[in-house]
Image: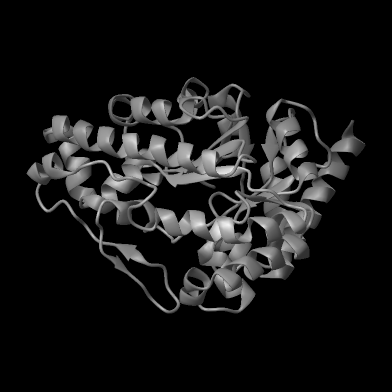
């Protein structure tokens, strides 16, 4: 992320009216590898190819705030691998982390990993160390510490159906599991920030939160998310949950979140109401159906519909309802950028 983009991000989060509305996308391996014309396996295994794919994106779309920016990741495998999960890799598909908890009693045998030494975490850091100089030479900085969230990781370590069932049937071991995972995540986020002094943001991604009802959310997710976000002394506290977002939205300010990416099934107006305008919203058109598979005309119409009737356009960064999906073309990204600009012009004319 460039200094100018970072300043714009902070301005939006602080409630300043930025016109035209900024455009931002979460980008990582599902989109970048295919868009850059390389295999997913090459993207993960070649530091050079990883860097060049990210560099190509930021150069081709300089007006877009790409989040978190030069994301060093191994799909969903980074954090589960530290707990001993077997990682299965594919040439042109996302890797998968296998379960390590066959029975709920196995939770008592789980110990907190060390992010300096365990799993793929050291490889994430080394990739960034090796290319930090070139990232800076390109005018960008490493601004975010990034991790999958505690429930997301727990559902890789333990069958997701068993995890969700145990929340109701046997919650005490689930709390022990989430406490151990959260302890690790606090260490992992702090290590990233210590390693790269330019870090002033944290991104936590946890879709499993969206599968909970309110009472379960308050009991199972809220205290652990609060601990992670409030352990980070940073300017931007970014949460991604593109499953059901209604359950967590009213609690985001309490958690400490000030930037939220959510499902396209929730409108910007609905999320503004639920967050009382206190949290910056990153969204919100459909990912696969429109941004990836739609025509430029469909994208323009969707952007118009998403912004129509928004009286207060502060704390909004236009995006899709989730991370950038596989298959989004440059043409469609440019159509999105153009449509957001046109929406800004229309709003100015109305004033």
In terms of depth relative to the viewer, which is nearer, 302 or 57? 57
Where, by quadrant of the figure, is residue 135 drawn?
Answer: bottom right
| Model colouring | one colour
The reply to whether residue 262 is visible in this rendering is no
Identity of the residue drawn at 33% across and 56% down? 119
Of residues 215 and 122, the one nearer the viewer is: 122
Is residue 350 found left or right of 238 in the rendered image? right
Number of numbered callouts drawn = 0
Relative to 119, is 170 above or below? above
Q: Residue at x 62, y 44 (%)?
A: 283
Image side of residue 216 versus residue 174, left or right:
right
**56 or 128: nearer the viewer:** 128
Image quadrant where one finds the C terminus: top right
Q: Is residue 347 above or below residue 38?
A: above
Picture coordinates of residue 222 (x, y %)? 37, 27
Q: Nearer the viewer, residue 142 or 314?
A: 142
Residue 129 in view in this figure: yes
Residue at 16% from the left image edge and 51% from the top image edge: 101
Q: Is residue 194 above or below residue 274?
A: below
Please state if 238 lies on the left or on the right of 107 as rendered. Answer: right
Q: Position of residue 213 (x, y in %)?
A: 32, 32
């Amino acid at each position: 992320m460039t200094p100018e983009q970072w300043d714009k991000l902070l301005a939006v989060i602080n409630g300043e009216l930025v016109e035209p509305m900024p455009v931002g996308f979460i980008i990582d391996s599902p989109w970048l590898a295919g868009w850059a014309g390389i295999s997913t396996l090459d993207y993960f295994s070649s530091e050079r190819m990883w860097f060049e794919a990210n560099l190509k994106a930021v150069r081709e779309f300089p007006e877009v705030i790409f989040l978190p920016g030069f994301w060093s990741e191994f799909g969903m495998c980074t954090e589960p691998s530290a707990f001993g999960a077997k990682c299965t890799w594919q040439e042109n598909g996302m890797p998968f982390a296998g379960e390590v908890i066959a029975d709920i009693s196995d939770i008592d045998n789980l110990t907190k990993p060390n992010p300096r030494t365990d799993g793929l975490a050291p490889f994430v850091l080394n990739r960034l160390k090796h290319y930090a100089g070139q990232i800076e030479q390109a005018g960008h900085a490493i601004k975010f510490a990034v991790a999958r969230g505690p429930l997301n990781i727990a559902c890789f370590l333990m069958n997701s159906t068993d995890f969700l069932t145990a929340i109701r049937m046997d919650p005490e071991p689930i709390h022990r599991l989430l406490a151990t995972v959260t302890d690790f995540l606090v260490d992992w986020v702090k290590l990233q920030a210590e390693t790269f002094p330019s870090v002033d943001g944290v991104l936590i991604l946890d879709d499993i939160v969206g599968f909970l009802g309110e009472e379960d959310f308050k009991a199972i997710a809220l205290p652990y998310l609060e601990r992670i976000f409030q352990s980070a002394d940073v300017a931007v506290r970014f949460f991604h949950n593109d499953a059901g977002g209604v359950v967590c939205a009213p609690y985001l300010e309490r958690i400490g979140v000030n930037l939220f990416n959510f499902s396209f099934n929730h409108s910007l107006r609905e999320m503004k109401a639920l967050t009382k305008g206190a949290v910056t919203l990153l969204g919100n058109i459909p990912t696969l159906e429109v941004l990836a598979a739609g025509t430029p005309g469909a994208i323009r119409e969707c952007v118009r519909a998403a912004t129509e009737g928004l009286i207060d356009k502060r704390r909004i960064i236009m995006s899709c309802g989730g991370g950038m999906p596989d298959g989004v073309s440059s043409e469609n990204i440019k159509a999105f950028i153009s449509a957001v600009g046109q929406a800004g012009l229309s709003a100015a004319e109305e004033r």
